[in-house]
Amino acid sequence: MIISSFLEELAKIEEQLSKQANSSRDDLEKMFLSSNGLFTLISKQITELDPNDRKTAGRSLNQLKTAIEAALAASTSTNAKDKRWIDLTMPGEQPTVGHIHPISQAMAEITGIFERVGFTRVRYPEVDWDWYAFESLNMSPSHPARDEWETFFVDQKADLEKGQVVLTPHTSNGQVREMERLGEPQIRMINIARCYRRQQDVTHTQMFHQFEGLVVDKGINIQHLKGTLDYFAEQFYGPGTKNRIRPFHFQFTEPSFEVDFSCHICSGTGEITKDGRVEKCRFCKSGWHEVGGCGMVHPNVLKAGGIDPDVYTGFAFGWGIERTYTLKKGLEIDDIRLLYSGDFKFLEQF
């Protein structure tokens, strides 16, 4: 093909474009840019030209392409959606807005509950010395909690007085710190922070949140402790919530208790009916769900904090927020790992 014939064809296509100036966008695209369109076919013929003529032909081809694009931009569409009437005075569509994570919501609610009865919200280190996490809490060097299979130890040089550095396995590291901060009672502390333990299953995560309560004053006894637990249960879960304390052993309290709430999934029965079959509740296994520990502050802990145990007594409790939150009526969460799954479909429900 010679260059003169190629340019004549381009001129004819350009003339056609001029005649179709009022056509719709869809018609123009079909006529010129479809697989059998005029521009598409003429573009393929450029390879038939003499190599010395292709530069001239390419320049003319680009000019035609620019003209076609301008015609398309000025044309209207036959698409009904693009022809719809638009009221520019109407408000725009609201963008998707996130919300506070359910655990953060629970932390705010718990803080408010205890602030109403005189507790002060504090926060202490999540990476702390062994002294505050274990030693000052009456835990011997051979205590199982200080084993590397239970606690995360930080690869850092140990302090001669305060020992190794750990990721705090509980918020109880704030007990002696609060005693040191205030110097003397009255103490009413609620400490909320992240904790870390080497456990992972439907009721445990390696990183979780705890809230630690501590009350130290003259004449504090178990009745004050149980009354505080009853108050929290009524406020957080609603009137009539069942809770119990069971004798247990913790190094930093004496006497010590485990705190249980009735399971919301099986209604405290320990069993659920699934597909017509009765099965043991996967979440609680017994009808009761253990949320944490509590007890009267051990005299050795008071001494570590510089407080005379012959004058003052106190109680403490520490619970996992995730496990406590999953007992909320209507949530039906049987695996706390879902809270950190990052699944929007799950999180958007809260």
Image (cartoon, grey):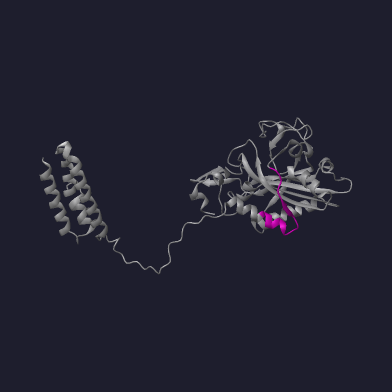
Q: Is residue 116 magenta?
A: yes
Q: Quadrant of residue 175?
A: top right
**Residue, far right:** 310
Identify the residue shown where x is 52% and y is 50%: 347
Residue range highlighted in magenta = 110-125
Q: Quadrant of residue 254?
A: top right
List x then y, in percent, for residue 298.
81, 42
Q: Nearer the viewer, residue 290 or 200?
A: 200
List x then y, in percent, for residue 235.
67, 58
List x then y, in percent, for residue 216.
81, 50
Q: Nearer the viewer, residue 28 or 249?
A: 28
Q: Nearer the viewer, residue 279 or 215?
A: 215
Q: Is residue 238 left or right of residue 77?
A: right
Placement of the N terminus among the 4 image quadrants: top left
Q: Quadrant of residue 208?
A: top right
| Numbered marks: total | 0
Q: Is residue 229 left or right of residue 272?
A: right
Q: Is residue 112 left or right of residue 185?
A: left
Could you tell me if residue 290 is visible in this image?
no
Placement of the C terminus among the 4 image quadrants: bottom right
List x then y, in percent, for residue 38.
16, 49
Could you tell me if residue 238 is visible in this image?
yes
Identify the residue shown where x is 38% and y is 67%: 88
Q: Is residue 272 magenta?
A: no
Identify the residue shown where x is 71% and y is 39%: 128
